[in-house]
Image (cartoon, rainbow, N blue to C red):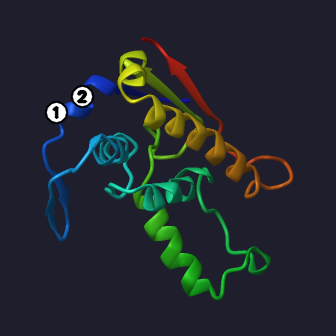
Amino acid sequence: MIEVRIDFDEIDKIRELNYAYGNHIPENIKEKMLYFLSLKLNLPPTHNWDTFKEFYQYLNFKELQEFKPEDGWASYDEFLMIKEEDNKCGVKNKQGVRDNLKLIFINFYKFYKEHNELANKLLNFISDVKSEMLNYCDKNNNDFLNITVVIES
């Protein structure tokens, strides 16, 4: 299991979002939070929900292992391209393989008090991601990654 400690007090320290195409000054706490989580989870930087919602694509499979035409790949080349891109992102263990994920939220209660709606949206989002991942696992659940959220403070 991979543990990722996320201290919500660090979110306010984000002053500038650095992207490949330039910098963006975050307009609100939502943008800061999504960018911060992107960094912590080794995902492509984003500051909007629509892009961040795709993060399950980088976490739901332990690894893309083999080409199966029934999985909907247009071609083997498409599979290889997606596999290469997919394997760059996401949190991995010391052996370089994705594993079950334990998100440890620190100072979350304080964040929750200050940004109740956003905190609820994040928790609901994680729940939705877990549900979405079930749609993609094989019949033995071998591809399924378990995400656990622990709130320490």
Q: Position of residue 107 (x, y in %)?
A: 36, 17
Distance in Å between CA atoms under marks 2 and 1: 5 Å
Q: Amino acid at mark 1?
A: Lys
Q: Secondary structure at mark 1?
A: helix
Kindly identify which numbered label has been placed on residue 134: none
In-front residue for pair 126/80 = 126
Q: Residue furthest top?
A: 153
In-front residue for pair 72/116 = 116
| Residue visible at 52% across and 56% down in the picture | 53
| Residue visible at 33% across and 24% down in the picture | 7
In-front residue for pair 76/109 = 109
Q: Secondary structure at mark 2?
A: helix
In-front residue for pair 40/86 = 40
Q: Are marks 2 and 1 in contact (CB under 8 Å)?
A: yes
When asked about the image quadrant of residue 10, the answer is: top left
Kindly identify which numbered label has been placed on residue 13: 1
| Residue visible at 18% across and 71% down in the picture | 21
Q: Position of residue 35 (x, y in %)?
A: 31, 48
State left or right for residue 103 relative to residue 20: right
Q: Position of residue 19 (x, y in %)?
A: 21, 62
Q: Assign the N terminus to one quadrant of the image.
A: top right
State left or right for residue 116 relative to residue 46: right
Kindly identify which numbered label has been placed on residue 10: 2
Q: Amino acid at mark 2?
A: Glu
